[in-house]
Image (tube, grey):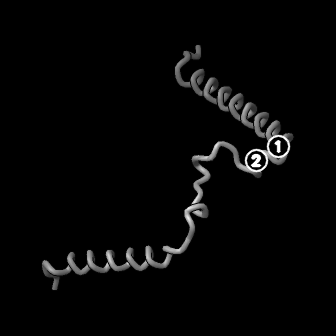
Amino acid sequence: MNSWFAPLQWLVFLALWRMSYETANINKPADSLKSFLIEKTLPEETANPREKEWTEKAVKKYAEAQGKKWQHWNEAMFERSD
C-alpha cells in the first residue's frame, strides 16, 4: 500500500543518486566541460572555407524554396478562383 513515506523514499534515493554522480565526476577539470553553444566559432567549421560557401548557398536555396511554397499556399488558400 502507498503511504506518506513513499515520496520521502524517492527523494532520498534521488539525492543519493545525484551525490554519487557528483562525486564520480569531481576530478574532471573545468576545461573539459566546454559548451559549444556559447563558442563563437568551432574549429571544424573554420577548416574549409568552401564548406561555408556551400552552406550559405544551401540556406539561400532553402529559404527561396520555402518562400515559393508559402506563396503557392497563400494563393491557393486566400485568392479566389473563378
Give the residue displayed 44% in from the left and 73% down from the top: 22
- Mark 2 vs 1: CB contact within 8 A: yes
Q: Is residue 9 left or right of residue 44?
A: left
- In the picture of the structure, the residue carrying the numbered disc 1 is 51
Ranked by sequence position, the earlier of labels 2 and 1 is: 2
* Residue nearest the viewer, comparing 29 with 73: 29
Residue 31 quadrant: bottom right
- Count how many numbered circles sit on residues in the image: 2
- In the picture of the structure, the residue carrying the numbered disc 2 is 45
Q: Which mark is residue 81?
A: none
For label 2, count other residues whose C-alpha is less than 10 Å away and answer few (under 14), some (14-19) or many (20+): few
User: Going by the picture, which residue comes out furthest to the top?
Assistant: 82
Q: Does residue 70 lie above or below 21 as drawn?
A: above
Q: Is residue 2 left or right of residue 26?
A: left
Q: Nearer the viewer, mark 2 or mark 1?
A: 2
User: Going by the picture, which residue comes out furthest to the left?
Assistant: 4
Considering the numbered disc 2 on the image, is that residue within a helix, a strand or a loop? loop
Q: Where is the N terminus found, in terms of image quarters? A: bottom left
